[in-house]
Amino acid sequence: MELKLPIYLDNNATTPMDPRVLEAMLPYFVEKFGNAASRNHSFGWVAEEAVDYAREQVAKLINADPKEIIFTSGATESDNLALKGVFEMYASKGNHIITATTEHKAVLDTCKHIEKMGGQVTYLEVNPEGLIDLKELENAITDKTILIAIMYGNNEIGVIQPVREISTIARKHGVLFFTDATQAVGKIPVDVQADGIDLMAFSGHKMYGPKGVGALYVRRKNPRVKVTAQMDGGGHERGMRSGTMNVPGIVGLGKACEICMNEMEAEAKRLSVMRDRLENGLIELEEAYVNGSKEHRLPHVSNISFKYVEGEGLMMGFNKNIALSSGSACTSASLEPSYVLKALGLGDDLAHSSLRFGLGRFTTDEQIDYTINAIKDTVLKLREMSPLWEMFKEGIDLDTIEWAHH
Amino acid sequence: MAYSDKVIDHYSNPKNVGTLDKAKKNVGTGLVGAPECGDVMRLQIEVDEATGVIADAKFKTFGCGSAIASSSLATEWLKGKTVDQALAIDNMDIVEELNLPPVKIHCSVLAEDAIKAAINDYRVKNGMPELELEEKKH
């Protein structure tokens, strides 16, 4: 098969939609356009039926009851609803939330907002593997703690937190457990019963579904969890999330979940083999390091630092042909390199030198071969141009140099 | 963010990558930036002692495409200039030539700093007083 360029290896940012998902959605734009809340005519009934069916598809993937699925506009909204909703609903019980420094900004910034509203938030550090310490978690719990918010799989390094152990601790202390599982649902088995999850956020466009739709799982039994609505209006989604249902989006999310349910296991195997091949090919280079735990990791993610070259400069060597992300500051509006990599204890220099690979359903072996070669060539070329590489090769310890800080 | 054609050209075909013998009296070396900031530039000039003209210039840069392009361009401009003429190179000339966007202006400032640091190194080696340099914002 001829290799088509550019190659997309940024599936943690977003995934392409599966054509089967698009096919399922199409009738719900023009032909079956009804409002799912219209109770008095067939247009509404058809839409409602589609939403109900999607709710079942979504629930099945995570082993939940359909009634426990609240549709939202995406994981950011679900994160906000879970955190702020619990904070408001359980105000009489306490005001303390425990989270971690490597969480997504949608969780961290929401926690900052909650702090401004009088909440107390503990941000747990992670070890060099990217994992939280369970003892530290348990020690952080006070009689004011209402929620533990720890993500399932990390978006930058793919590290999977010990979710079951976390929920056991939460249960023991009567604290709710919320997890942002945006990168995990549809990629690895996520089971809200076995995992002991009380609230869980996830999104359509990270699992080959459409953008603009996501869900929040809210447990109904043992314990019954409630969240205060953050959007007031018509009382949709059992009063927890008002707003006309995004019927085509919800249908798409449902179909995406169904496909993941059927294909996830084989896909995860295939992608982890490819990911390992990519990773092993690249760390043949001198001074190339995998970031985060290799043992507890999503099957399709790899994050590698190529010491002595800078991430954005590196990407420029192949970004016409390969799309991926870097932890370098230069790729973001802020001038700080990745806070996740820094939380692992990486120096800024290594964080600046990192690339994130996100493989996906449509990644091929030919693409992996091309990527290994293109990145190796660029790293070697840029190292020839790097004063740091020259110093390293001369045996100069870069830490002994007095750098002019700007 | 798209790069200008000139940045892409310097990145793909950088001019004057390399190392001059820093032990030589007529070679000035400037090393600016810091690894943790994501940019380090080393710029070197070799001065023809008879004429005071910069006969050769080399660079090595750790940084983004704009940083590499800024230092590549700087070495091109330096060659053939006298040391005094070289001092007149302003970072905004680099910004204009490479069409750098506002977030990349610091790359041009770093290149100007590297030029001045190299010249100062050359001056000090040859018994001339170090020049006081104004601090530019990065």
Image (cartoon, rainbow, N blue to C red):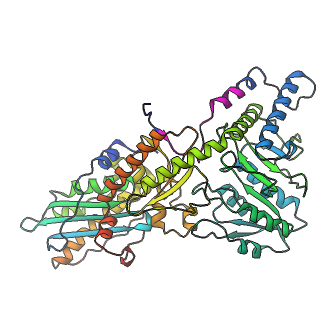
Does residue A158 belong to the magenta stretch?
no
Q: Which residues are magenta?
A: A7-24
Residue B125's place in the image compared with A236, above or below, is below
Quadrant of the image occupied by residue A37: top right
Residue B9's place in the image compared with A89, above or below, is above
Q: Looking at the picture, how far across and down is residue B130, in whole percent? A: 24, 76
Quadrant of the image occupied by residue A252: top right
Residue A286's place in the image compared with A399, above or below, is above
Q: Looking at the picture, how far across and down is residue A393, in whole percent? A: 30, 68
Q: Looking at the picture, how far across and down is residue A156, in whole percent? A: 57, 56
Residue nearest the observer in this picture, A78 or A200: A200
Apparent side of residue A212 relative to residue B64 in the rendered image (left or right)? right
Does residue A20 belong to the magenta stretch?
yes
The residue located at (87%, 40%) in the rendering is: A236
Q: Looking at the picture, how far across and down is residue A268, in whole percent? A: 61, 46
Q: Is residue A356 visible?
A: yes
Q: Is residue A118 visible?
A: no
Apparent side of residue A182 relative to residue A194 in the rendered image (left or right)? left
Q: Which image quarter holds the N terminus of chain A?
A: top left
The residue located at (91%, 53%) in the rendering is: A221
Residue nearest the observer in this picture, A211 or B107: A211
Residue nearest the observer in this picture, A49 or B63: A49
